[in-house]
Amino acid sequence: MADTALDQRPEHQRQAARPSWVVRPAAAFVGPLCVVLVLAALVALWTAGAVPALTQPIVLGYLVLGVLLPGIAVHRSLRGVQRTWAADLTLGGVTGLALQLAAWLLYSLAHAQSLLWTWPIVVLAVVAVLPTRRRVLARPPERWSALMTASVTVAIGMQLLHLFRSTVARYPLTDPAAQVYMDLFWHMGLIHEAKREFPLIAPQAIDSGPVLYHWFSDADMAATSLVTGATVPDLVITLWPAYLSVLAIVSIAALAQHVSRRRSSVPVAAALAAVTITIGPMTDWARTHDYLTALSPSQVYSVPILVGVVMVLTSILRGERRPGTWAALVLVSLAMAGAKASAPGTVAAGLALALLATLFLRRQRLLVGGLLLGYLAESYLASKLVAGGSGGSGLQLLSVVSLTGSYRAVNPGYHFSDSTGPVLDLLVSGTPVGPLFLLGALTLVVLILCRVLLGVAPLVEPRLRRDPVAWLLCGICGSATAAVLLIAHAGYSELYFAYGATPFGIVAGAWWLGELIDGDARAARFAGAWALVGAALAGAFDWVQVPTGGESPETRVLTAYVALAVAGLLLALWFAVVAWRRNRRSARHRDAGRRAALIALSIWVGSIAVSGPWMAVTEPVAQPTRTDTTAAVATASAWIRDNTPRDALFTSNWHCETYEAVQCPSRVWWASGLAGRRMLIEGWSYTPQSAHAPFFDPALLEINQRAYILPNEADLDVLRGRGVEYLVAIKNPTHYVSPQLATLTDKVYDNGVIAVYRIR
């Protein structure tokens, strides 16, 4: 395949010269149809999640008219209309989230949360009187083609289907006995707290001090709940992640077109962004690819905001430096500061690599250096004020591999706290295959980072190497790769670096593929054929799975790691050959390098993209786990919400997932989360003073527990002096509650498992 084509004009010029009747009639019909389909999918998901029928239009109307519309108006007022509706929706959606956060903050400081519904009206009224209102009403000059719109719609549909199967069906709110992922209770507690006042204190242990967690997502849901009246569980599990998933998919596709300046990048980005990866040679890695997991509200919230930040940075790096552009960057960057702990640092890492590139390119050095200093300062301040979460982290090479069932099959006695060496146990020695085990583990990390590693594009493609934006994307993806390789966290939170970088690997991959094809129809068909080969290979590998722990002999697992090691060596060799030939001066070598790069990249993209339709057909619907204790907790929470003051202070005798102790996995948050009440002592694992550490006040904990086991007036007086009005107790073999407690207090509720006592 030669580098030449019949029509050698750039793609955007060929598209602009195409007769309007080729694109516009189809786009004019497909666009509105796709909007209707997305709205129907949202309604179907929310209905399946048992969201009340009246709540659905109220929430949808508020998100569109009360968040998205003011965001678009303000962003257009600052920068003017964008080239496409997708870019307008992305930047308007992100700006709307930032404005809603600012409005919540101001109204909370004024103790006027009941008037929060007025903030969109105020914003739109201000924009209406500004001299920039004419550009606010302008239409984007470019319309997406039918293929572009349809591909993004399909990607959204697959993501919403995955959200239903993995989360909504697993945690049905209509079933009180169905267990809910415990970290969601933590977020629910913060949402209830954000509805009460600002600054936030940790409602799970009110004496632990202000919240240092990345809580902006919780404040956003609190604002939505205050305006619409939607319940907190409905927002956390169903309403809110669905809306943000739609915004995330649209934003990734819009960024792909924005950085590449190619319309053909949109369908590729949509295919890569569609859904979690569910097939491959190591299927026990599938769940680690879910970069839009609803089980982490802060992760879902951070994706579109990060994309918006990079989109504005791209415009600045390419010459748009009006005051309004800088104002827009500051606004969305402030929203990013508390969205996710890893977010500001990854942007700073991207700018650091871009600065290094500009030193060689000899342009924009002061601009990129200034931006880098700004984001380093933001990252530092955010880590101190609103974006904690590093507790329990250390350094260990390839610690993340221990998450897989295949590793646990080889090392069944593994425990995180026992593995303290610089390299994960058994990777270098201790198995019959020796260092090949390490190489196999490295190849596993390549699989988990299969989309992130597309960010290496400027290292291979000469055309991208001259653009600082490509190095920005490469730096974001490279820092995420380093974090996954080197950080060890008991909860495997290093994966969030990969999740945050996934959109930018997707964009870099779509950009890279577009540069290789460059509008050549023959090259596009060639790439499509090899993408089908990649899809077939991925599907075939799914039939040759490595069994998870306990399902196969150790030798079979080790053999699979050896095979992965060999595959990894071949992959590295291919990459080296492609990079070498693509960058030779000889036209023959460059052409051969282009062909090799196109084959490799097409296979890579095809093997990833096939997960979308594969998931849609084969992914099972997650089933809820039901227990009597969960049902008792749900009914007790409902009683507490309906029969106790909203600002009442509670305490509890149930803190630990295992046995009760001063130091334990303390992640029991149902009273603060489901019931929405402040707690003197509940779960302390994520609190500022006791994150992954013993409870900060052992004497108070002892008094608290003794009030249940050996109740006496002195201990109850201490609790009363702390402001406690109610004691909530679980009664089971590991949590004894003395009958004497009912004589010293008023028992106001008891369902046999959970009891509530009011202090006299």
Image (spheres, rainbow, N blue to C red):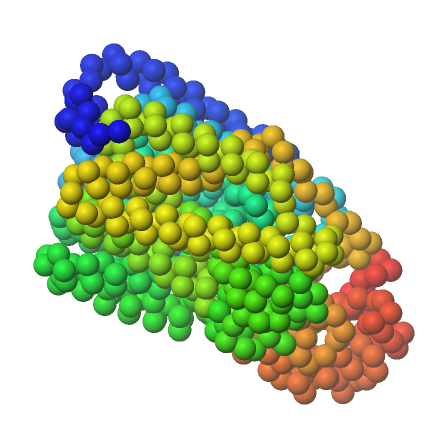
Q: In the picture shown, does residue 732 fall above or below 606?
A: below
Q: x, y (%) of residue 160?
A: 53, 36
- Residue 79 placement, left or right of 291: left
Q: Nearer the viewer, residue 367 or 738?
A: 367
**Which residue is drawn at the image coordinates 80% and 62% (left, top)?**
754
Q: Which of 560 and 709 is in front in this view?
A: 560
Residue 660 seen in this snapshot: yes
In the displayed orientation, state which residue is furthest to the left. 362
Q: Which of 571 and 287 is in front in this view?
A: 571
Residue 324 seen in this snapshot: no
Q: x, y (%) of residue 358?
A: 16, 59
Q: In the picture shown, does residue 145 fall above or below 322?
A: above
Q: x, y (%) of residue 438?
A: 52, 64
On-image quarter of the C terminus: bottom right
Q: x, y (%) of residue 267?
A: 37, 31
Q: In the picture shown, does residue 678 fall above or below 191?
A: below
**Which residue is drawn at the image coordinates 52% and 72% (left, top)?**
423
**Which residue is drawn at the image coordinates 27% and 41% (left, top)?**
593
**Which residue is drawn at the image coordinates 62% and 55% (left, top)?**
559
- Residue 628 placement, left or right of 685: right
Mark count: 0
**The quarter of the displayed image where residue 426 is located:** bottom right
In the displayed orientation, state which residue is furthest to the right. 739
